[in-house]
Image (spheres, coloured by chain):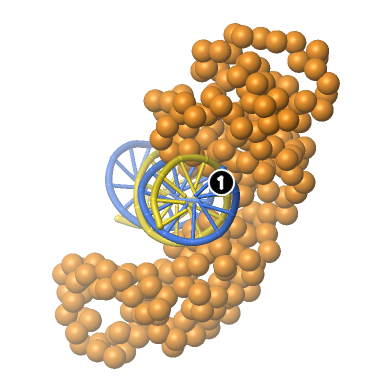
Chain colours: A orange, B blue, C yellow
Amino acid sequence: MVRSPFYDKNGVKKGAWSREEDDKLRDYIQRYGHSNWRQLPKYAGLARCGKSCRLRWMNYLRPNLKHGNFTNEEGELIIQLHQKHGNKWSLIAEKLPGRTDNDIKNYWHSHLKKSLKGNEHRDRDTECGSRASHDDDDGDGDDESDDQCHNILESSLALPTDIAESNMEWSRDQDQSSSTVVSWESLSLCSDDFWSRPFLLENTTTTTTCFDQTSFPSFCFPYPYEGIDNLSDLRGIFLDW
DNA sequence: AAGATTCACAACCGCGGGTGG
DNA sequence: TCCACCCGCGGTTGTGAATCT
């Protein structure tokens, strides 16, 4: 159901999250918050990019998330809100506690849009039934009509109110911050999109440069020790401190 | 029973906005 | 004003599961 895990050319892990990764991410965020997604994977000991961590947390690990089927009430509300706001999924998600924008977006595309499409077909058949029957004679016309409907439904601005209303009838039928900011000098050596930049301890050439963390006062290490194991990182912390 | 098709949804990608130097 | 960094959003894709033929 999800992409198989793999490593990209930068050594960043992609694809499905393992149980262990979930645990690491959850534990880290619960303890230290997520004030800096980009640096989080390094501190948490994850071979992921910050963007991936954020997505996983927001869409799956965050507390109080609802998983599973949408209720009729939720579906109804989504239709109403989509009619009002269009594809502003995050806006819609704010009105549905426990649901993420991604969930709602997926639900819309897999359930509601299809049903609206069905209603649209009915409406069109009512308005010009003979034409519709011609289109469907060989089956090809249906695909074309689907595309037309698709275009309409892609934009909520173009979504006729009566369609949405008719669909509502169908519906009835059925943190604490870790104050992290540390200026990592080593970061300036990196380039590319910051989201995909790896923060991999495993792949850095300096990881073998060890130091005794226990020699420093504990307040020097607001993060789990395993996330700070090279001297340039340590230097960044002290420069900022 | 087996292959084809569709469904459902987790995850990725690219873009744009906000912010600070 | 410009630029880089950081973040969040919305569109899209990939793939296992379910269903159909």
**Chain ID, mark 1:** A
Q: Amino acid at mark 1?
A: Leu
* Residue at 50% from the left image edge and 67% from the top image edge: A88
**Residue A30 place in picture, x, y as percent:** 75, 40
Q: Residues within 10 Å of mark 1 (few under 14, many from 20)?
A: few
**Residue A74 place in picture, x, y as percent:** 61, 70
Vertical relation: A146 (above or below) A15: below
- Reading the image, the residue beneath label 1 is A55
* Residue at 41% from the left image edge and 35% from the top image edge: A192
- Find residue A178 and report its image quarter: top right
- Find residue C8 and report its image quarter: bottom right
The residue nearer to you, when weighing A137 against A78, is A78
Count of numbered tags? 1
Judge whether residue A178 can be spotted in this image.
Answer: yes
The residue nearer to you, when weighing A182 against A45, is A182
Q: Is residue A240 left or right of residue A13?
A: right
* Residue at 54% from the left image edge and 32% from the top image edge: A48
Vertical relation: C17 (above or below) A46: below
The residue nearer to you, when weighing A105 against B1, is A105
**Residue A194 place in picture, x, y as percent:** 48, 38
* Residue at 69% from the left image edge and 37% from the top image edge: A180
Q: Is residue A240 left or right of residue A168?
A: right
Q: Is residue A49 left or right of residue A68?
A: left
The residue nearer to you, when weighing A47 against A141, is A47
User: Element under label 1?
Assistant: helix
Q: Locate the C terminus of chain A and report the quarter of the image it occupies.
A: top right
**Residue A75 place in picture, x, y as percent:** 57, 71
